[in-house]
Amino acid sequence: MVESIRQTASRISQLKIQGARNVAITAIEALVKLSELTKSKNKKEFLEDLCRGQKILFSSRETEPLMRNAIKWIISEIEKTDEEKVKVLSKIVTASANEFLKNLEDSKTKIAKIGSKRIKNNSVVLTHCHSSTVTKLLATANREGKKFEVFCTETRPLFQGRITAKKLIKEGIKTTLIVDSAVRSIIKEIDLVIVGSDAITSEGNVINKIGTSTIALIAREARKPFYVVSELLKFDPDTICGDYEKIEERDPSEIWKDGPKNLLFRNPAFDITRRDFVHGVICEEGIIPPHSIFEVVSRKYKWIFQ
Amino acid sequence: MVESIRQTASRISQLKIQGARNVAITAIEALVKLSELTKSKNKKEFLEDLCRGQKILFSSRETEPLMRNAIKWIISEIEKTDEEKVKVLSKIVTASANEFLKNLEDSKTKIAKIGSKRIKNNSVVLTHCHSSTVTKLLATANREGKKFEVFCTETRPLFQGRITAKKLIKEGIKTTLIVDSAVRSIIKEIDLVIVGSDAITSEGNVINKIGTSTIALIAREARKPFYVVSELLKFDPDTICGDYEKIEERDPSEIWKDGPKNLLFRNPAFDITRRDFVHGVICEEGIIPPHSIFEVVSRKYKWIFQ
Amino acid sequence: MVESIRQTASRISQLKIQGARNVAITAIEALVKLSELTKSKNKKEFLEDLCRGQKILFSSRETEPLMRNAIKWIISEIEKTDEEKVKVLSKIVTASANEFLKNLEDSKTKIAKIGSKRIKNNSVVLTHCHSSTVTKLLATANREGKKFEVFCTETRPLFQGRITAKKLIKEGIKTTLIVDSAVRSIIKEIDLVIVGSDAITSEGNVINKIGTSTIALIAREARKPFYVVSELLKFDPDTICGDYEKIEERDPSEIWKDGPKNLLFRNPAFDITRRDFVHGVICEEGIIPPHSIFEVVSRKYKWIFQ
Amino acid sequence: MVESIRQTASRISQLKIQGARNVAITAIEALVKLSELTKSKNKKEFLEDLCRGQKILFSSRETEPLMRNAIKWIISEIEKTDEEKVKVLSKIVTASANEFLKNLEDSKTKIAKIGSKRIKNNSVVLTHCHSSTVTKLLATANREGKKFEVFCTETRPLFQGRITAKKLIKEGIKTTLIVDSAVRSIIKEIDLVIVGSDAITSEGNVINKIGTSTIALIAREARKPFYVVSELLKFDPDTICGDYEKIEERDPSEIWKDGPKNLLFRNPAFDITRRDFVHGVICEEGIIPPHSIFEVVSRKYKWIFQ
Amino acid sequence: MVESIRQTASRISQLKIQGARNVAITAIEALVKLSELTKSKNKKEFLEDLCRGQKILFSSRETEPLMRNAIKWIISEIEKTDEEKVKVLSKIVTASANEFLKNLEDSKTKIAKIGSKRIKNNSVVLTHCHSSTVTKLLATANREGKKFEVFCTETRPLFQGRITAKKLIKEGIKTTLIVDSAVRSIIKEIDLVIVGSDAITSEGNVINKIGTSTIALIAREARKPFYVVSELLKFDPDTICGDYEKIEERDPSEIWKDGPKNLLFRNPAFDITRRDFVHGVICEEGIIPPHSIFEVVSRKYKWIFQ
Amino acid sequence: MVESIRQTASRISQLKIQGARNVAITAIEALVKLSELTKSKNKKEFLEDLCRGQKILFSSRETEPLMRNAIKWIISEIEKTDEEKVKVLSKIVTASANEFLKNLEDSKTKIAKIGSKRIKNNSVVLTHCHSSTVTKLLATANREGKKFEVFCTETRPLFQGRITAKKLIKEGIKTTLIVDSAVRSIIKEIDLVIVGSDAITSEGNVINKIGTSTIALIAREARKPFYVVSELLKFDPDTICGDYEKIEERDPSEIWKDGPKNLLFRNPAFDITRRDFVHGVICEEGIIPPHSIFEVVSRKYKWIFQ
């Protein structure tokens, strides 16, 4: 029973599942399965099993606040209930999981709708890497009949910008691809930068794909608005307690498959964009300054800090 | 006779010859050959032939100040002389060409020696793209027994950073490769940035490989010294007359060989780093502020403005 | 009945009524009148009438958050009540309207009192355009016996700075008038900048008379405190949902009455001062960073988001 | 009875007691003693006595928000109770005082624990002046086995940096002392700046020992994180109402004991670091942006604004 | 004889003649006339007369480097000559005056030609106040067939921007007029700022119409190129010796003809734009950084420092 | 004979002689003495002796460009002459030495006169450490009848600011002393910063007493002019060849005489102020941008580069 959760954790840690959202969904499914297979006989044992599962899932990757918040919330729902029957508890897990996933989907739709209002007619948007929420936001604006075009960076080393480019072309949006280094050369043609987010800290800083903070710096120098699209549940509650957001270091072969032997590599997957570079975080609550994100999360998702 | 120079020009314009220095050398050789083959009978005809050659070479690529200055100088040597015999004139061309090339080589050695003094023991240097002068500078410092390490960007789209990395490893210098987007993440470990240059304008701005100006911006934000290595003859005298330095736009296939049909590309080869980002230009005259480069060139190479 | 509200709306849209506060008061009065004349027979019909009135008033001018919030609040008071009798409902409208107006007046007094503490003896204050709250704040400080002087910009194109200057002279405050372009020349003599506000967005940005953001930029460059005086109800709840604050474009004749035929004009009435330029918003809750204004409004005026 | 509180106030105003924390503790003790000696016969008289004591203590020094908040809280506890017996009320004062002091101590421990997570292995920390909370934070990190070193400024005119240096050496932490003017020269070796705080304003600004804001400026220029360690109760509720934080001017003899007669001196004890320079305030609630401190205090310590 | 020069000086000081260029031309003419009417009998007396004239002209307005440099140059030509006959000396004055004026006109044409190269097709230029050289530059670009448009500020208090607008319309250039305060709102549509100059200091700073330095600040914030058009002879040699460039304070009635009695005014005619805001000075030598202007003038016009 | 020069060198290296100017004077005197005592028999031997003396003096302290330039100049005068008699050569040395010292004194007077023009009536000047040229400049302004006051930093660790304060009081100038850390608190009252210089580099950077660059940073933040007073001969010609200006590290006891054993110290004597912080260098040539100092020195003191 725990075995299955261990397999999921292992697939996550081996990067077979990628993207904050996909990792969260997979972990939730594993927890639901665990709750169905558990042999516990009462709430106490049931909870112990869940917590064991939680521990395994949490150790699968260093920084995945969305996944952690999801698991935490489901378990908090069990803790709250007076129910003792394991069957019922299991159903509560399933229901909570579904509710969480539905809310996540609703947030995405809401964010896309809110954010699409920022796209003006005849404007030029720049984005970096691939974020399904950003893509949805742009598609929403396009379907509303707005005329605009998009610049994508290719996003080395894994070229996720090509995925974004393909999806935007499919939507019929005029799209231009550039190398990451060319952003400062084309920034004066840009009206608006929109990027996704992997995690947000209590200081209001944004962790996202390597290169994001450089684009933020360039945007600020040229006085261009820089927006981050993020579900509030990407807030990392550990940062409030002083923990640093860990920055994953990936395999050198992503950069150069058959590079010379003595050559060293540094391959950080993410970087940190400080709050002062971010005009607004577009979240399910609306568009807010990153400085107040801790307060907004405190108000809306109190359980996150338990 | 002019045919041969046309072939050279064509090879230059098709990018079969690359790098400011190589283009200059090739063009000089073509001019020497022209002076040997010319059927002119006096200085006047001889000069007309040279000028025809010059015109063809100049039109081969938009921005190559070093090549242009080289050709201009050789022709100015002929203009100055009272000699009328074509044979002798041809020898003057060859001698001038050799002198120019020797000076160019001497400048490189001098720059490497001056610049190597900026490398302190136990320091970390960042460079971008591939510049043979920067590589020579680093090799010089290494041979002098200094201990230091180097970070290279891979330099998309053509990965010239890999060439730099290979050469530095060969010299036994500890070298780390990163993607272009990772510069801001590692800048706090860097003590000094050194890059090459393709052209310098009368305002003191530096034209160099795409991505250079972003690194300059990041270096300034983190209060790290940013040096440009350049022979003074990369100064573009046309810029004093108001001409913009042209920025070559290269083929999209450099970015994505088999990208989707409807996808647009922008692929500028160079960008402009404004003088305020440059701590010093390391040239054959020493280390100078870019603000006074027009004055230094005026003092040392008056003929450049004729 | 609806006719009368249409007349009011028309007067507002023709700029016969000006200033956020005056527009709000006029709209409130129109709504009260509507509630007295309505022929509705129950709460449902009564509300429908009010909403029709609201729609007309809202369409009278693009951006008037104070007016919109006022109307919204009065209607929310009706929605909350269990009362069904139209007569009583009408009285609730009147009472709510009066309460709103009283609170608005109280806020102004409170802001003037709080803000006047920022005026130190022997200091020099700069203000822009005309804001009755800023004038009241300065008058309050003057009546408390503080010695200080004020610089006013003339505020092109409509010279509202002259109104401010006249009122301050009447109060016996030493006042100097300058052209808008002279702010940067006199900023080093200034200790404090205080301006009013037309609207505040969810990002914490301030919409105010054209020229305000330039003064903010100049103040920041010279490290001078820049305060914005604003009732919290100038917060625009639509901005939280992604809407841009619209910037009204006024008639060219304001700039040049009999200018040449082919000459084009641009005459934006307002500009946007980003939160990072604002030391504090002086509101009825005290002096707060603009970054947290969305949270303060959420805490104090929840109904605004309904 | 009031005499004893007057003596305490006098010792505070003569600077015989120093440090926000020590002043608060002494004032609390004086209030407890007053509550024990009072001859009042009922709650009303008891409260009047307390308020007299409060008035005397408040006038002892201009800016001591921690002391003021402590006294205010104890009195608010009496106001809340329905108890009328003076004996019991006195016990409530003692109990409240103890609770306050315990909370203060707990906050310190919590802050040290949270903040110590920001100290990475092999990092270099800079601090200014002497703050017992910062020292505790560093000691905590050291005891957890982290390897790091600390730079202290000497902190003229009273050399409090020497106290910090001595305490850190005692803890076995590698420590280097520099003159205040040398910060900009060594900043590139620093990974993190941590300082204490005397008061925090509603705008999110930090009042701390003279020199703090200069270090903040230098840290920002060099892109180094700057953290402020502070209990939330150092928030000054008067600032929300427009009051300026007063900056104490101390005796010239602190600067030069036997300076020439005609020489003037300026000796401000504190300076103001604006919120934009502060990465985070490390408080008992976690690490937060200074921009939201008013909201956090509003949420956690509502009584502070009464 | 001296009378006639006094009349000219008086017309200059009463602002009946305006613009650096017109003042210079008028003063030159007066000096020529003086040299024709002089009753001096030898070079010594002739020079004394000229110097008397110079003194009167110099005292007519505080800051007019172009006029001062013109007079100085003519006199230096007399000093250099060995001629003693007054008749001939007078002819030398006339010849020198004509040469100076011709050079001035040539410089203008050269500047217009050089500067016009900075205007790209489909670009948008912003200018401030009225400068005949800027207008000529724009007209030159227009006649060369370039498509571009221009934004003019109205330039309070004297509305010189309207003159510019009229002239540009006459040339068939698409022109838009804005109030001075609207520059920051439209700056993102601007590609290039070009303004004139009244004087340049040894530090490389530019004195020009009030409002210029604000536009420079806005341009820098938005990363837009800012060019100054100036003949090198607007360099003020007194500034090298420490003199400040004086800023003329004009009559209040320019701002408000019938303003209230007690109202004070400040009406500086010019402001100072520091060299760091200026991308390049477009002068007869080409486009140069303002930092090296003292060196360029030293090289080209040595007599200016005598 | 060489012995005497060794003694001088030893006194210099033991810091018994301090200040760029005093070190230069002492070294010149030692060279003169050497030239008088030399037993050389011809120019060749005489020069060899001088060069031996030069070598010893140069090794006495790392960075003393003024001393080095002085010695270099005297020797270059010998090299130039055709004279062979040792007696005469010795006299040339003495004459050159006197000429150098006279020029140095003249430069100081000229600088004081030029710089004093920057002091406006009723202005407030800030200075740091002790520079005899700055003191002379202020005294000159005072004797010209200008009313102004001066703020001095105490300048830890050696309190040289107290020397400045004493001298200014003696001159009858209103003077206020502050701790180094208080500069940012009083900067808004300052109109002008003037400091001395120990050396200037080819990049235009200024080496001066520790703390100078922090004041420059604070001045720039507050938009206050920052001037450096320096003879051109403080230019260090080695820096043009890439050498770093060495920063002397002094004895810890200067900071804390009897500090604890395990405490480490860092005591750099100087810091580097980058050219971008300096409004102008006030030198004997006038007030110039630091960016062009290499060019000005090249023009005026060519021999410095030999």
Image: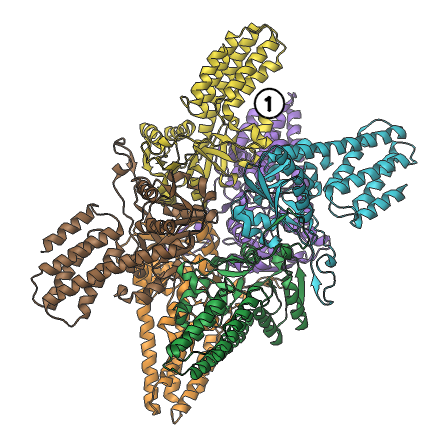
Chain colours: A purple, B orange, C cyan, D yellow, E green, F brown
Residue A20 horizontal/vertical position (percent): 57, 42
Q: Nearer the viewer, residue D269 or D118?
A: D269
Residue B287 horizontal/vertical position (percent): 35, 61
Q: Nearer the viewer, residue E280 or D261?
A: D261
**What residue sits right under mark 1 in the picture?**
D303
Check the image and report above or below for C226 versus C74.
below
- The quadrant of the image that shows the N terminus of chain C is top right
Q: Secondary structure at mark 1?
A: helix
Mark 1 surroundings within 10 Å by alpha-carbon count, few (fewer than 14), some (14 through 19), many (20 or more): some
Residue found 45% across the figure and 43% down from its top: F187
Residue B201 horizontal/vertical position (percent): 45, 67
Q: Amino acid at mark 1?
A: Trp
Residue A177 horizontal/vertical position (percent): 57, 59
Q: Nearer the viewer, residue A6 or B239?
A: B239
Q: Is residue B269 visible?
A: no
Q: Nearer the viewer, residue D170 or A132?
A: D170
Quadrant in the rendering for residue E165: bottom right
- The number of numbered discs placed on residues in the rendered structure image is 1
